[in-house]
Image: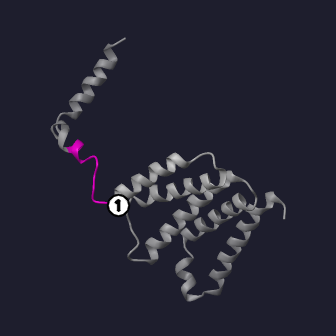
Amino acid sequence: MKQGRIFPSFLLIGIGCYFLLQQLSIPFATQLLTWPSILVVIGLAFLAQGYWGRESSMVFPGSLLTGLGLHFHGLQLLPSWPDHWGMYPFIISLAFFLSYQKTKRDGLIPAIILLMIAIISFTSFNPFAWLLHTFAFLGGIWPFILIALGIILLIKK
């Protein structure tokens, strides 16, 4: 198979399977045949192009779309699936890790930073809580501060 035909081939096969399962009306398959399935199909096509087609630039969007599709399926199908904003930096972190694993060049630092943000978000520890207490007095005067800054920017040459 030619390298450039991997993505459209997997995309057509995936979408064909999606519509075939819709026509067959299999009871369990109807729960899976929602819009997140399209994300998974497109993501898997990107991943196939990235790994078998040796195009490392396709690994990041493929893993991102697949991860988001699986996350949204998890939200719909599993009551214990975490519905927390920390899942998004975690999924993006995994996409960076897979991209780094393929290229061995870029993405390790953002992957580690996003993974730390995701881990911190899932814990009850809030490293920025001291900021809220320190600057709580600014809550009522912040509009005046913005107005003053705007006037200073207007006057200053």
Whether residue 2 appears in magenta in the rendering, the answer is no
What is the quadrant of residue 79 in the picture? bottom left
Residue at the disc numbered 1: 122
Query: What amino acid is found at the position of numbered circle 1 in the picture?
Result: Phe
Q: Quadrant of the C terminus?
A: top left
Whether residue 126 appears in magenta in the rendering, the answer is yes
**Quick one: 152 or 10, which is closer to the camera?**
10
Residue at position x 41%, y 53% in the image? 116
Badge 1 density bin: few <14, some 14–19, many ≥20, Cα 10 Å: some
**Quick one: 87 or 144, which is closer to the camera?**
87
Determine the main secondary structure of the stretch shown in magenta.
loop
- x, y percent for residue 56: 69, 53
- x, y percent for residue 41: 63, 68
Segment colored magenta? 123-132
In the rendered view, would you say 142 is above or below 125?
A: above
Number of marks drawn: 1
Q: Quadrant of the N terminus?
A: bottom right
**Quick one: 75 or 15, which is closer to the camera?**
75
